[in-house]
Image: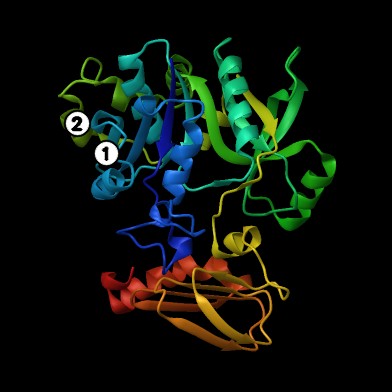
Amino acid sequence: MRYCVIMCGGVGSRFWPFSREEKPKQFLDFFGTGRSLLQATFDRVLEVVPAERVLLVTNRRYAATIREQLPEVPEENILLEPARRNTAPCICWAAHHIIARDPEASIVTLPSDHLVLKERAFHEALRRGFEFVEGGDRLLTLGIKPTSPQTGYGYIQQGAAVEGEADFFKVKSFTEKPNIELAKVFLESGEFFWNAGMFLWKASAIIEAFRRHDPATLDVFAAGAGCYSTPAEMEFIDRVFPTAPSNSIDYAVMEKARNVYVETVDLGWSDVGSWKALHEVSPHDGNGNVTQNCRVLQHDCHNTLFAVSDPDRIVVASGLDGYIVADAGNALLICPASEEQRIRQVVNDVKERFGEDFI
């Protein structure tokens, strides 16, 4: 059977002050739809995988939020990490849990906080991807057709085409966050695609890939054979999970394995990874300004994003060009969009100077 694993344990510090440690980006409704990014991801996948086979992997501190936002997910499908260890341990645990339930299972693994505008294309990509990985020992990633020379994304270079499979290619190389000159070369070549962090594989195939390329992580979870999908699972995970190496699935497995393929797709995708990215995918006024769920009185402002969490609050601004204005709770951020990469450091500075109540 087919399963989905949604990874939803991240902090999302680049969206401070909206995204806080107690309620990060994936649990927020950035687009005023009435559904958070996590809920939208869950809704989107149900066309391909039923709710009873959708698993959520998150940090334990978000258990109550998960249950509040997605009460239809069975309790046994919520895997609560006792520590943050990046995506490789998350995926390794989920694969062991699922294979104990279904030795023949195939899995799609998704981030919880991305935007997909072309949902029909997404559903078709998943169906074709499942068929592809179920046909052999294959690890598949979805490659997004780039529209601009982005430096904040990883890139996948397509290799030889898979015979008889349109849009499927062997992966030739991975490149993480190139500089702008290299990103332009990638875009012009037509051989490179954005790495969206969406993966498909059989549970047995990804476990074997860990055995070959990241045995340190595999050993942590293989020691629990016999306890997965039983009442003993969480006691075991609580004990061993913090000992797992902290590593991404890209570095741990995908960049090393030889049986990695890419399905090239156009999904209307964005990782919505920053305020600038949110500005790019949101409706603009005639001067390039974006207002997110707030009321703004502005004069001579251009290319600026205004976001306020309190609907009773107004923003009055004049003469801003290329700024982020974000007000939430007890914090206000005013920052040139060109310097948004500093927000993570700003969060650390705020914590050090003012304390954890502001992060």
Asked which quadrant contains residue 60, the reply is top left
Quadrant in which the C terminus appears: bottom left
Looking at the picture, the colour scheme in use is rainbow
Give the residue number, with chain letter if any, for mark 1. 80
Asked which quadrant contains residue 339, the reply is bottom right
Residue at the image point whose x is 65% and y is 76% from the top: 322
Residue type at the position of mark 2:
Met
Query: Residue 164's spot in the image, x, y percent?
Result: 75, 12
Q: Crowding near pointer 1: few (<14 within 10 Å), some, many (20+)?
A: some
**Which secondary structure lies at badge 1?**
strand
On the picture, is 160 further left or further right than 235?
right
**Along the viewing direction, whichever of 269 and 349 lies nearer the viewer:** 269
Which label belongs to residue 213? none
Which label belongs to residue 234? 2
Residue 216 shows in the view = no
On the picture, is 122 further left or further right than 32?
right
**Along the viewing direction, whichever of 73 and 345 lies nearer the viewer:** 73
Residue type at the position of mark 1:
Leu
Query: Residue 128's spot in the image, x, y percent?
Result: 62, 21
Q: Where 240 falls versus 27 (above or below)?
A: above
Residue at the image point whose x is 63% and y is 34% from the top: 120
Q: Crowding near pointer 2: few (<14 within 10 Å), some, many (20+)?
A: some
Residue at the image point whose x is 49% and y is 73% from the top: 294
Tag 1 near tag 2, CB within 8 Å: yes
Quadrant in which the N terminus appears: top left
Residue at the image point whose x is 58% and y is 30% from the top: 123
**Along the viewing direction, whichever of 322 and 36 lies nearer the viewer:** 36
**Which secondary structure lies at badge 2?**
helix
Label located before the other in sequence (1 or 2): 1
